[in-house]
Image (cartoon, rainbow, N blue to C red):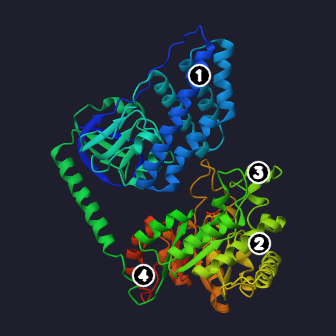
């Protein structure tokens, strides 16, 4: 029996025969060409063919995993169309007389290396896209066919050095029971896709992978990040039980679709979803979300060349409202700035962007864009039950100013003869200590609060939420300092008779569910995949029983 420890990338247990996927790309030899013109032509025609293949992969991914995850292939097309990329390859061919394969490989390596040195964990991972694109180009030039995962005769457990997005997307979950890789992290594309596709996965095994043998019986534990080869009888039985328990648990959760989110003593909780793009409504409906507690509208601005027009925004909001058929949809006005920058706004660099011009601060500095969004929201309001929330509030004046612009837009639309649904609830996100501490005053200005515990925690604890070197004990929403502010906010909301929800990641943290409900939080908004698990948790809570000691003591 051999036991390996890696990174748990996607939940689940699988037991099966191991199959190695040999996708290691061989290095291209340095060769010179007699005819650079011919090489330039070869490069251009390979590039066009690669773009076409990526189009096909994009359509395949749209069907299997939906638009967000398929954006990977759009991003790869953008790399292939990037002027710097094309110029670099063409220069190497015309000036150095390299053959196209070598020029492509060298450019790909240089750019992948540059991306991997970026000081941002998410972007760093994108260097695998450059490698994917570069390998595809070399294959196109060689006339080699892509290694194909779609004709695997499963069921197997797949092992590979690394898996590129284009390879992962070809996996059929019925044939590939799980995969294990030497490279990768939790945020690498293969990991993200494995979670969306529901394939258990352990990544980052590094050199331990070489201990695995083709055809061996292996157990993959996607909860703990463990891989066991040739398990002994007792281990095998234990994992068979775990696998069965997980399948039963999934089935049990599915039975909660349509059930009420109500505690044992009868308190109803509104269980909603956070979404980033309209296409995620499918996941909300599939998982039986009762509404949308947070639609991060700023996502509509990312990965594009210019600000989305009023019409584009209107269509996006309308789509979400219509598909939610009368269930409440809270759309947050754009929370741009900090880690969500868009180059086309040409914002001046900031020393301390997380504390800089973001959220409502930025919207109020660009009233023309803000009013455009408010127009789109109001026009869409007739298609469902809309509520609008302002992000990163820290003063009363910000909310008053935002409401003033809201009324101005309302009057404009009225003059134009356009119908606006009334009333539309207006809310404030409680994400700064200031907002929590003046929540009694803010409660007089708005119809509801939603507590963004991700930012609230970072600001209360002075602990950057994106810095992996910060100790997790500091970035902890269970810290009493954070919970005290949640309690203050919930109390002030209740005193004024407005509702108060939580939409940060902590809303799905089962250590906090009971605490939040006891504080008077009436709505929890979480990722669609967490809905049923959270409903199960809520249904097991009895608020009539005296509160568990621990949290009560620290608050
Ligand atoms: C939050 O800060 O908790 C929140 C929900 O907003 P975001 O994660 O988008 O900053
Ligand atoms: Mg936030």
Measure the alpha-carbon separation of dots 2 and 3.
26 Å
* Residue 1 placement, left or right of 192: left
Q: List the single residue furthest toward the left.
A: 233
Q: Name the front one of labels 3 and 4.
A: 3
Residue at 80% x, 84% y: name it. 415
Which residue is situated farthest in the top direction here? Answer: 34
Q: In front: mark 2 or mark 3? A: 3
Q: Nearer the viewer, mark 2 or mark 1?
A: 1
User: In the drawing, does residue 317 fall left or right of residue 211?
Assistant: right
The reply to whether residue 530 is in sight is yes
Crowding near the residue tagged with mark 3, few <14, some 14–19, many ≥20 C-alpha atoms within 10 Å = few
Foreground pick, 480 / 363 = 363
Task: Answer with mark 2 or mark 3, whichever residue precedes in sequence.
Answer: 3
- The local secondary structure at tag 4 comes to loop
Q: Is residue 547 above or below residue 276?
A: below
SS state under label 3: helix
How far apart marks 4 and 2 lie (CA) works out to: 32 Å
Rendered view: 521 above or below 287:
below
Residue drawn at x 59%, y 35% is: 80
Q: Nearer the viewer, residue 513 or 95?
A: 95
Q: Which residue is under mark 4?
A: 261
Q: How many marks?
A: 4
Residue at numbered disc 3: 344
- The reply to whether callout 3 and callout 4 are in contact (CB within 8 Å) is no
For the residue labelled by badge 1, is the local secondary structure a helix, a strand or a loop?
Answer: helix
- Give the CA separation, mark 3 to mark 1: 34 Å
Tell me how far mark 4 sits from mark 1, CA to CA. 62 Å
Would you name the residue on which mark 2 appears? Answer: 394
At horizontal 69% and vertical 31% (from top left) the residue drawn is 84
- The residue tagged 1 is 41
Image coordinates of residue 163 in percent, x first then y, are 42, 38
- Secondary structure type for disc 2: loop
């Amino acid at each position: 029996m051999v036991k390996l420890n890696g990174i748990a990338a996607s939940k689940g247990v699988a037991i099966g025969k191991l199959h190695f996927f040999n996708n290691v790309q061989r290095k291209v030899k340095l060769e010179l060409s007699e005819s650079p013109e011919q090489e330039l032509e070869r490069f251009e025609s390979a590039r066009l063919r690669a773009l076409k293949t990526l189009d096909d992969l994009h359509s395949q991914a749209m069907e299997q995993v939906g638009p967000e995850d398929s954006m990977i292939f759009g991003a790869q097309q953008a790399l292939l169309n990037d002027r710097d990329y094309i110029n670099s390859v063409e220069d190497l061919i015309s000036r150095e007389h390299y053959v196209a394969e070598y020029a492509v490989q060298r450019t790909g390596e240089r750019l992948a290396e540059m991306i991997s040195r970026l000081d941002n964990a998410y972007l760093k991972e994108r260097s695998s896209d450059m490698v994917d694109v570069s390998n595809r180009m070399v294959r196109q030039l060689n006339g080699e066919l892509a290694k194909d995962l779609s004709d695997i005769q499963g069921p197997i457990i797949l092992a590979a050095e690394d898996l590129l997005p284009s390879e992962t997307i070809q996996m059929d979950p019925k044939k590939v029971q799980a995969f294990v890789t030497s490279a990768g992290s939790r945020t690498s594309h293969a990991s993200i896709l494995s979670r969306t596709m529901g394939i258990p996965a352990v990544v980052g095994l590094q050199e331990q992978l070489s201990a695995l043998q083709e055809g061996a019986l292996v157990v993959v534990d996607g909860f703990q990040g463990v891989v066991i080869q040739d398990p002994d009888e007792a281990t095998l039985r234990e994992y068979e039980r775990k696998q069965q328990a997980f399948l039963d648990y999934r089935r049990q959760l599915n039975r909660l679709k349509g059930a009420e989110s109500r505690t044992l003593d009868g308190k109803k909780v509104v269980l909603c979803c956070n979404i980033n793009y309209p296409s995620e409504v499918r996941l909300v409906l599939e998982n039986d979300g009762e509404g949308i507690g947070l639609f991060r509208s700023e996502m509509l601005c990312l990965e594009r060349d210019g600000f989305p027009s009023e019409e584009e925004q209107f269509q996006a909001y309308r789509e979400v409202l219509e598909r939610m058929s009368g269930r409440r949809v809270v759309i947050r006005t754009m929370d741009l700035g900090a880690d969500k920058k868009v180059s086309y706004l040409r914002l001046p660099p900031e020393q301390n962007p997380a504390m800089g011009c973001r959220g409502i601060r930025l919207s109020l500095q660009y009233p023309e864009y803000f009013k455009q969004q408010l127009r789109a929201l109001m026009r869409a309001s007739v298609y469902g039950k809309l509520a609008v929330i302002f992000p990163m509030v820290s003063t009363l004046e910000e909310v008053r100013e935002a409401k003033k612009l809201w009324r101005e837009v309302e009057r404009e639309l009225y003059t134009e003869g356009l119908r606006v649904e009334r009333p539309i609830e207006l809310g404030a996100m409680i994400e700064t200590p200031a907002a929590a501490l003046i929540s009694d005053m803010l409660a007089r200005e708005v119809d509801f609060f939603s507590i963004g515990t991700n930012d609230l925690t970072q600001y209360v604890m002075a602990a950057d939420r994106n810095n992996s070197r910060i100790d997790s004990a500091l970035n902890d929403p269970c810290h009493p300092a954070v919970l005290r502010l949640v309690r203050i906010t919930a109390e002030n909301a209740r005193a004024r008779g407005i509702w108060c929800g939580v939409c940060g990641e902590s809303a799905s943290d089962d250590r906090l569910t009971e605490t939040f409900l006891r504080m008077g939080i009436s709505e929890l908004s979480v990722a669609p995949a967490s809905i049923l698990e959270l409903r199960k948790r809520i249904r097991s809570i009895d608020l009539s029983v005296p509160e568990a000691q621990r949290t009560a003591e620290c608050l």
